[in-house]
Image: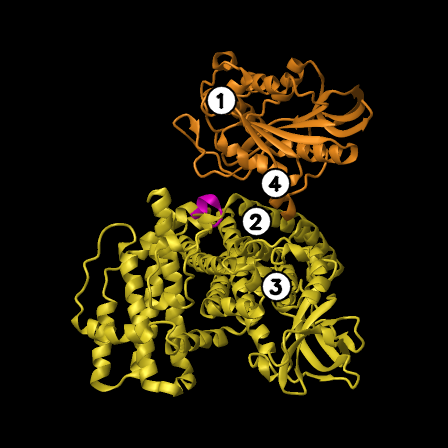
Amino acid sequence: MNELKEAIKGGAFLVEDLDASRIFTPEDFNDEQKMIAKTTEEYVKNSVLPVVENLEHHEFEHSVRLLKEAGDLGLLAADIPEEYGGIGLDKISSALISEKMSVAGGYSITHGAHVGIGTLPIVLFGNEEQKQKYLPSSASGEKIFAYALTEPGSGSDALGAKTTAKLNAEGTHYVLNGEKQWITNAGFADVFVVYAKVDGDKFSAFIVEKTFPGVSVGAEEKKMGIKSSSTRTLILQDAQVPVDNLLGEIGRGHVIAFNILNIGRYKLGVGTIGGSKRALELAIAYTNQRQQFKTPISSFNLTKNKLATMASKLYATESLIYRTVGYFEERMSQLSPEEQKDGKAIAASIAEYAIECSINKVVGSEVLDYIVDEAVQLHGGYGFMQEYEVERLYRDSRINRIFEGTNEINRLIVPGTFLKKAMKGELPLLQKAAGLQEELLMMMPEEVGTEALAQEKVLVANAKKIGILVAGLAAQRFGTKLEAEQEVLVNIANIANNLFAMESAVLRTEKAIGRDGEEKAAQKLLYTQIFTQEAFIEIEQAAKETLIAAVDGDNQRMMISALRKLTRYTPYNVIEKKREASVKLIEAEKYVL
Amino acid sequence: MNIYVLVKRTFDTEEKIVVSGGKIQEDGAEFIINPYDEYAIEEAIQVRDAQGGEVTVLTMGGEDAEKQLRTALAMGADKAVLINIEDDVEELDQFTAAHIISEYLKDKNADLILAGNVAIDGGSGQVGPRVAESLGINYVTTITNLEINGTTVTIKRDVEGDTEVLETSLPLLVTAQQGLNEPRYPSLPGIMKAKKKPLEEVELDDLDIDEDDVEAKTETIEIYLPPKKEAGKVLEGELADQVKELVHLLHSEAKVV
């Protein structure tokens, strides 16, 4: 991306249109990125999967060995600049590593915690000495990193942490006291990024080494899934942390925490793609091989229907996630070398896409959960048996809806951030909303063209209008009290999630048709048609419920009728479309485009 | 040591082969380095690391094969050569390939040339030996171990499951069998470095080869997929009758007796 373009604004998709050429799609991977993906796949297949059983039984000496091996291959160095022993890859390559790694189940959480939340705070917010000291050993896997934010009493309310830090009398060390709970990699990590309140009120981040006096870990947790990862409590009892190990500024820890959470969410989303692909592949392979009534069960229409639904959800999710990866790549690659060393500039770039990060997390984790659930279902009783990989995938999936901020918290973030941006004038919500009410009264049903994606584009355009209408009316009705109307906020978030997903699918398919022609993009078109239509139904429902809650009397009747105008279209026979889409899936025995 | 590796771009082993209009459909298919050639590349890199020298990977084909060469460079080869025949040669066979490759290699003073035992697509296993033949150097096929001491080379080769040990000398061409080594996959720094390594492209003109001189000596008459596997049959009844029926079926249905 040599040409400087005005970076796309976070949340803009709700109020503005984007040209298909501006989004990044998985069809745009270059040869090196594909090679990096391949290396990661090979590493997972040849090194990790053969010891999955050992890892599931907490034989973590394998995790340490595997991370070292990953370090030798460069798989820990993507996000670390070259001057600190890393490779400093683009964000797309880094995302591909996360996607491919996720097939390794709980071990991918080990890897992700090390390269992501464990190391990135130092990459992004560390000072020169801290980067020199810690990053080379992270890139090589010589030292293993972890991240300690959650406490027994503070999960979603991260800033409610009780761990304290107090400067000692000599002024040489901060003395940390408290407990950090559910810390990934704690069983073998050497370095922890820990949050504590200096003097009990100034939320701050520290780099804490395991060998510092007063640092210890609790017993291994017994978890439902991701058993291949180590999860323990980090115990700080008068822990002696040198003053040089303060990360960022005193009292500014929340800036680090929230941005790392944003990145964590975005990376979590990327990871769900790999898991979803694997589950779908297992489901198709099994239904092809399993015979009942002397017929492979993949030849039953209900199986075809399920496979096609899974694949079209996956297509839309993959589209929205790599679109977001593209946003980050574009924005980060445009930072000047000085800005790249400036925590504030980086924080601003990440925070810009807080809405997209939350959507990636929510949609990715829920689609993964849907797909693993259906994959187990398609396996019948065998899917309930531990000999089948899909059983582990099902258990491993569940945590994704909980960690990095529950999906509920993340849903609340979407409209909250969006309205804040609108109030600040960063997004033209209010202008659009004002024009819209009038437009709706005059609106005549549009003639939909017959060319590919014509209907989907109308649905996307109308979904945007619905989103603006509903968000505008809710803001009007509840004003500053909107925060308490969590049900309404979640409805708006659901509209935004579906809108972002369907628009991303439409734009990706449009880009593909432009490049390869309609025939070669036929499968993508089918997924897009299926997904868009089903997402639109959910948008309509969420909008209706919200309108009824936010508007009364005559105005309510008017708004409901406006919604009806916006949701009038001639639907496809989606049953037929799904049968059609399943053909290629069943033949290829994997997610295929 | 001056080492060359002959590499072929082939269908991914996981691809389903589709034949239509008498041709194998390549549309949308994934391509890889022929797996046996990967053993050859790995061995070349190991020999170079132990003995010093340079590894050049060489392939013949079209522009698309650059990708496989880059992968070999990312694994650790030093240089790559693509003999681009896209515009010059339409029908080719083992003779064509061997002739062109040996013309390229004849003045390169290679000490060691490695190739895969067979390519998984054509499966002839001829190109390596033919190249050695026209260069006038020794060759050993299907090797599973290689030890070089000065110019003396000790080789283990796979002979239908048994192992033959033999000694020969450089310059030498060997073809790699499974078990020779465990090919590495490119590391990320390797991938980034590969971008900057030299990849030379030559055409038949550069080698003073006339298209007519490399015309294929064989003719492909038909391309078809193996017949679909039918479900097995379990014979029933008295043993003697079963035997009778089996013999009958082998005659009439399977037509193998």
Q: Does the magenta stretch include residue B218?
A: no
> In the displayed structure, does residue A82 sit left or right of residue B168?
left
Across and down, in percent, residue A70 comes to 68, 53
Residue at 23% in and 71% down: A564
Mark-to-mark CA distance, 2 and 4: 16 Å
Provide the residue designation for mark 2: A37
Mark yes or no: residue B229 visible.
no
Tell me which chain appears yellow: A
Mark yes or no: residue A487 visible.
yes
What amino acid type should be assigned to the residue bearing mark 3? Gly
Local crowd size for mark 2, using a 10 Å CA cut-off: few (<14), some (14–19), many (≥20): many
Between A171 and A453, which is closer to the camera in this rendering?
A171
> In the displayed structure, does residue B138 sit left or right of residue A551?
right
Local crowd size for mark 4, using a 10 Å CA cut-off: few (<14), some (14–19), many (≥20): many
Which label was assigned to residue B252? 1
**Colour mode?**
by chain
Q: Which of marks 2 and 3 is in front?
A: 3
Residue at 37% in and 42% down: A516
Provide the residue designation for mark 4: B194
Which label was assigned to residue A116? 3
- Which element is circle 2 on? helix
Figure quadrant of residue A111: bottom right
Mark-to-mark CA distance, 2 and 3: 18 Å
Across and down, in percent, residue A89 comes to 58, 53
Q: Which of marks 3 and 1 is in front?
A: 3
Across and down, in percent, residue B3 comes to 70, 27
What amino acid type should be assigned to the residue bearing mark 4? Ala
Dot 1: chain letter: B
- Which element is circle 3 on? helix
Magenta residues?
A: A585-591
What amino acid type should be assigned to the residue bearing mark 2? Ala
